[in-house]
């Protein structure tokens, strides 16, 4: 559903969220490769912002999928880091949106290549983290150094999806 929304811009309502919620337990049975493929297709969509928003707000991004490593099946998180961005305030002197909505705007307005879209999706993933979140003299939130934290977090996320090393390095470089 999230991919179709991203590709087609179809409208959705609360019934869709209810249907997704009902099916969330089945996501654990999906392979990491399948999930990566679907997310990549979503990332290429004209309405990527809408697909990502449904993915996060439905709870799908917070689910786990499966992968086989060293002969054992393990469950790996999909993209729970994204939910942490929802509602994270930014300094209104410099930002019009909270971190999540800023991210959605960035991704949809950016170049459609996978490398750039992944970089835009993850460029502020470190904002709001305890190691970078602070308050300036005027009482507004700051996230100095978030680009370094975001780059490290992005590397971890992309490696868990087993993207090629060259892809990971390029996205991390773009974020850093």
Image: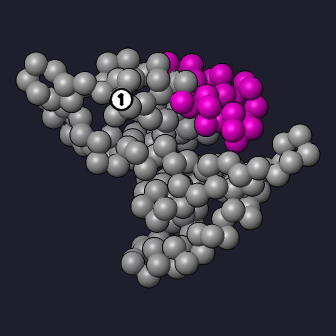
Residue 118 in percent (x, y) is at 56, 38
| Residue 48 appearing in the image | yes
Residue 174 in percent (x, y) is at 53, 23
Q: Is residue 164 left or right of residue 68?
A: left
Residue drawn at 10 percent across, 19 percent down:
137
| Residue 46 appearing in the image | no
Its colouring scheme is one colour
- Residue 50, placed above or below residue 106: below
**First to last magenta residue range:** 153-176
Examine the image and state in which quarter residue 130 appears: top left
Residue drawn at 86 percent across, 48 percent down:
72
- Residue 63, placed above or below residue 22: above
Examine the image and state in which quarter residue 106 appears: top left
Q: Residue furthest right?
A: 71
* Residue bearing mark 1: 130
Q: Residue furthest bottom?
A: 15
Residue 2 in percent (x, y) is at 54, 64
Residue 24 in percent (x, y) is at 59, 69
Kind of element beneath mark 1? loop
Q: In the picture, which quadrant includes the N terminus?
A: bottom right
Q: Is residue 157 left or right of residue 138?
A: right
Label 1 packing within 10 angstroms: few (<14), some (14-19), many (20+): few
Which residue is more in the foreground, 95 or 58? 58
Q: Is residue 65 left or right of residue 83?
A: right
17 drawn magenta = no
The tally of labels here is 1
168 drawn magenta = yes
Residue drawn at 15 percent across, 29 percent down:
140
Q: Residue furthest left?
A: 138
Residue drawn at 33 percent across, 40 percent down:
99
- Residue 94, placed above or below residue 109: above
């Amino acid at each position: 559903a999230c991919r179709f929304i991203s590709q087609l811009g179809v409208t959705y309502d609360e019934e869709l969220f209810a249907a997704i919620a009902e099916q969330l337990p089945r996501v654990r049975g999906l392979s990491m490769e399948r999930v990566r493929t679907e997310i990549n297709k979503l990332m290429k969509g004209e309405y990527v912002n809408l697909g990502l928003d449904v993915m996060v707000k439905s709870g799908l991004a917070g689910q786990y999928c499966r992968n086989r490593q060293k002969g054992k099946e393990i469950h790996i998180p999909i993209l729970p880091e994204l939910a942490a961005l929802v509602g994270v305030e930014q300094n209104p002197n410099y930002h019009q949106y909270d971190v999540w909505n800023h991210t959605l705007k960035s991704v949809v307005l950016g170049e459609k290549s996978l490398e750039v879209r992944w970089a835009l999706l993850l460029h502020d993933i470190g904002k709001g983290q305890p190691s970078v979140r602070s308050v300036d003299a005027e009482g507004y939130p700051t996230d100095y150094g978030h680009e370094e934290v975001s780059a490290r977090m992005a590397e971890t996320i992309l490696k868990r999806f087993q993207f090629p090393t060259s892809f990971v390095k390029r996205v991390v470089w773009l974020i850093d």
